[in-house]
Image (cartoon, rainbow, N blue to C red):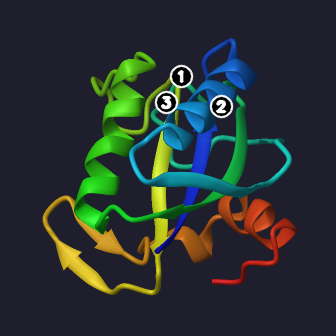
Amino acid sequence: MRAVVSLGSNIEPRADYLRRAVEALSRMPSTRLVAESSVIETEPVDVPSGFESMKFLNMAAVFETELDAHEFSRRMHEVEDDLGRVRTVRNGPRTVDVDLVDFGGLVLDEPGLTLPHPRAKERSFVTIPLAELGIRL
């Protein structure tokens, strides 16, 4: 199955967090990295007051996996946790944010997992790296 993910970081060392996240996702069982975009710097979107100056580094990556969508998503969140992601402020600063944008065209709307990602098409920090990889949402 093809898993398309969007990654972002706005806590230094931003580029290192992205690199480490891609490496960790690549090490998930029965999963391999197929492609990754370049890294772009973007303005924050929908962040709480006081965090507007914390620019993001964003990228996208495509994986082939034999995991199902729920297991891939669960392990993806473990990668975020392992890299120090703390969820104290909604849309606040983060070491790394990994979003599952598409999973083989699967359509789901469940607590904790909605596919395709409901806001990905509206976010240039997702669409620009995906376009570089030839992926249109």
Disc 2 designates what residue? 18
> Quick check: 30 above or below 103?
above
Which of these two is toward me, 46 or 12?
A: 12
Amino acid type, callout 1:
Gly
Q: Position of residue 25 (x, y in %)?
A: 50, 41
Residue at 52% over, 22% down = 95
* Marks 1 and 2, how far apart at CA: 23 Å
Q: Position of residue 137 (x, y in %)?
A: 63, 83
Which of these two is toward me, 48 or 56?
A: 56
Residue at 70% over, 19% down = 16
Q: Position of residue 118 (x, y in %)?
A: 41, 74
Disc 1 designates what residue? 50
Mark whose residue sits in front, 3 or 2: 2
Residue at 61% over, 32% down = 23
Mark whose residue sits in front, 1 or 2: 2
Contact between marks 1 and 2 (CB within 8 A): the answer is no
Amino acid type, callout 3:
Ser
Indicate left or right for 122 with 53 as reference: left
Amino acid type, callout 2:
Leu
Disc 3 designates what residue? 49
Indicate left or right for 78 with 118 as reference: left
